[in-house]
Amino acid sequence: MDKTAVIYYSLDGHTHLVATKMSEQLGCPAIRLHLVKEFSVTNTFLKYFWAGKSSVFHGKPALMDTDLDPDAYDTLVIATPVWAGNLSSPVRSFLSSHSFHGKRVFLVATNSGGSFERCFATMRMLLPAASVGGEIGFVKITPDIYPAHRHRLEKFCEGILVK
């Protein structure tokens, strides 16, 4: 039996929204990555400054021990916000710390505008031993506008469920 998990990082909640909707559709756990030292949540300028800097300079911040073993799953959906045009540094840390050999992996990204190309290209580069089955991006997704994206998300999930 194929075991699936949605693994994600979310700073402002947009990626969390998509990840939880996908886990509901797939009937699998949504596992959030947490940093040992999280970005500031009280100072918006500092939050975006440090998050963007971390992404631009390919930072790999320390992740908390979540007892997450990617080898326990056959299929992984990996979701990230796009920071400064690329994947978030917490997701970079996660992808860099495991081999994902023989795993089916699907990529998900959220942003507030712009392209997903560099983000997905970097994620694929960090997953050389995995079989990347597809990717999907969501722009400015919030609970209020989620219904407009629901069909796309459900169709993407159908593709994940097909073995």
Image: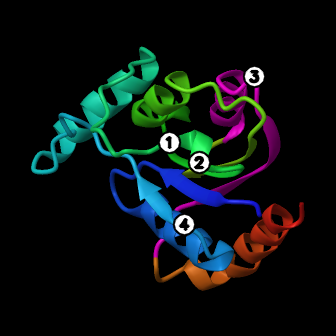
Measured as percent of width and height from the top left, residue 46 is found at 18, 35
Measured as percent of width and height from the top left, residue 82 is found at 52, 41
Q: Mark 3 or mark 4, which has the lower sequence index?
A: 4
Q: Amino acid at mark 1?
A: Asp
Pointer 2: what residue? 72
Q: Secondary structure at mark 1?
A: loop
| Badge nearest the viewer, 4 or 2 | 2
Pointer 3: what residue? 128
Mark 1 burial class by Cα count in 10 Å: few <14, some 14-19, many 20+: few
Q: Secondary structure at mark 3?
A: loop
Looking at the image, the residue that sits furthest to the top is 57
The stretch of residues the image draws in magenta is: 116-142
Pointer 4: what residue? 18
150 is higher (above) or lower (below) than 83: below
Q: Amino acid at mark 3?
A: Pro
Magenta stretch contains residue 133:
yes
- Residue drawn where x is 21% and y is 39% of the image: 39
Q: Which disc is residue 69 wearing?
A: 1
- Residue drawn where x is 47% and y is 72% of the image: 142
Mark 4 burial class by Cα count in 10 Å: few <14, some 14-19, many 20+: many
